Amino acid sequence: MTNTNIFINLAEEINKSTDLSEADKQRMIAHIMSAKDEPVNLLITGPTGCGKSSTINAMFNMEVAKVGVGVDPETMDISEYKLGNLRIFDSPGLGDSKEKDIEHARKIRELLRRTDAKGNALIDLVLVIVDGSTRDLGTTYDLIEQVIIPELGSERNKRLLIAVNQADVAMKGKHWDDANYCPDEVLTAFLNEKLSSIKKRILENTDVEVDPIYYCAGYKEEGAEQFPPFNLSKLLLYILRAIPWQKRLIIAENVNPDTDKFARTDGEEDYNEEIKKSLWDSTIEGAKVGSEIGAEIGDALGGTVGKTIGRVVGAVFGGIGGFIGGLFR
């Protein structure tokens, strides 16, 4: 299931404008529409049981796996899931045995070394999911420090996101507020300490500075009660910030249209508003390049043309329905 086509709606709204010349309209539309063909490739990896499939299911409304039922942790293959131009690579979990981990690591290295038709790295972002229910992160650190970061090369500070899942069962679930689906103050402090520890460890060992977050994908075993996610919008925002601006609308177009999945957060930022800004900036950047009127728009979107584009983007994001419409209404 996908959302209403964002790119078509942008083109329709631009065509309705009475303040832009036909030439500018066509240049803007051509560039924005070219972005819809941009492939986005995400690699999601982490130890067995960390909730990779749960995260994919919740974020993109894809039943890619029956969570906790019939999942073979011994599979040696990296699974691929496609949703439009979004492709998600789901790596096998590590931590089952030394022999399997060596083979898994080899396949991850091979994937990170692949390039696209333009010669750029195929994988736009590596999302490493950490199991929030355990203190033993040795396997995860080995994966990050010995496999992923060395293969990211000069882009190791840009293409890596670490997220601690299953926040609800950290501290054995004793400090999770089941009524409001969020951590209490004790658990929040524990989770923040965990993030600080991860950040410090990776910086000391690799000289790479990461900004990890915690969340809860919310999905449980098949047939059990499905609890809502927590901090899923924060995870989405961090994904958008990490990928190239011209690819952000591809992510947004394929995000789960159920806005309730993104409602519960830690409140540190207005993540929905920041998501809107990220997509707004992406669209404006595309319009600037496509219409060759960047100087007129400027950073503050000043001038008649900039204001027109602002109205166009606002109208589209406010009216296309689904995830974007609901989130930005």
Image (tube, grey):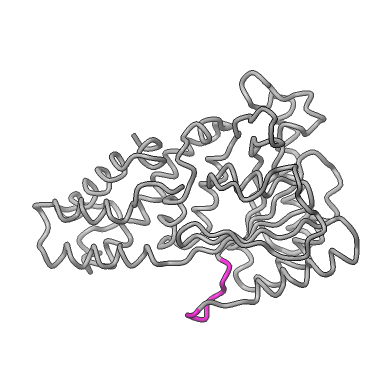
Q: Return the x and y of residue 248 as percentages of the image width and height.
A: 44, 56
**258 within the magenta span:** no
**121 within the magenta span:** yes
Q: Return the x and y of residue 194 as percentages of the image width and height.
A: 76, 41
Q: In the shown orientation, is residue 181 left or right of residue 36?
A: right
Task: Name the chief secondary structure element in magenta.
Answer: loop
Q: Return the x and y of residue 246 as percentages of the image width and height.
A: 40, 63
User: Taking 35 as reference, is 238 above or below it?
Assistant: above
Residue extending furthest toward the right: 98
Q: In the shown orientation, is residue 157 left or right of residue 30?
A: right
| Residue beneath the point at 45% across and 38% down | 272
Q: Return the x and y of residue 170 as percentages of the image width and height.
A: 77, 34
Which region is colored magenta? 117-123
Say which quadrant the C terminus sits in: top left
| Residue beneath the point at 27% across and 63% down | 288
User: Taking 190 as reference, is 31 above or below it?
Assistant: below
